[in-house]
Every structure is written in C-alpha cells, then in structure tokens.
Image (cartoon, grey):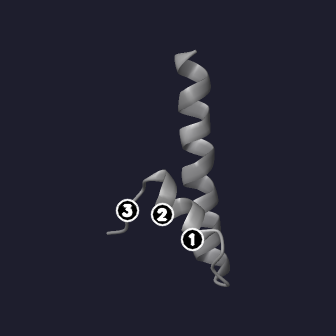
Amino acid sequence: MEKTDLASARRRMKSPNIKTRKRALKILHDTKRKQQKSR
C-alpha cells in the first residue's frame, strides 16, 4: 500500500513510470477537489 499524501504524490510526479504518474495525478486532483468543496 502506498502513501496518499500530497508530498508523496508530488514526488511521484517526477517518476518516469507512467502508471505511477497517473496515480499521483489522481491523488493531487482529489485533494484539490476536496479543498474547493470545503470553501
């Protein structure tokens, strides 16, 4: 199981692996969406 926090996701965006990058992007998008809902 991998971490799903923001720092880990940002670090994974630098990975050469496409699947890893896509997973990281999904995490970043989800957190961004949650922040907008709370406002």
Q: Which residue is mark 1?
A: 12
Mark 3 and mark 2 lie on one chain; the one further toward the N terminus is: 3
Label 2 residue SS: helix
From the top left corner, tell me how far across and down residue 8 is, in percent. Answer: 48, 63
Q: Which residue is mark 3?
A: 3
* SS at badge 1: helix
Q: Which numbered tag is attached to residue 8?
A: 2
Pick the front one: 19 or 14? 14
**As shown in the figure, which amino acid type bears the numbered disc 3?**
Lys
In the depicted structure, whether residue 20 falls above or below residue 6: below
Residue sitting at the far left: 1
Q: Quadrant of residue 25?
A: bottom right
Task: Categorize mark 2 by other alpha carbons within 10 Å: few (<14), some (14-19), many (20+).
Answer: some
Seen in the picture, residue 34 relative to 7 is either above or below; the reply is: above
Q: Residue at x 57, y 74 (%)?
A: 20
* Image quarter (top left, top right, bottom left or bottom right) of the C terminus: top right
Q: Are marks 2 and 1 in contact (CB under 8 Å)?
A: yes
Disc 3/disc 2 C-alpha distance (Å): 7 Å
Under tag 3, what secondary structure? loop
Tell me where residue 36 appears, x and y as whole percent. Answer: 62, 24
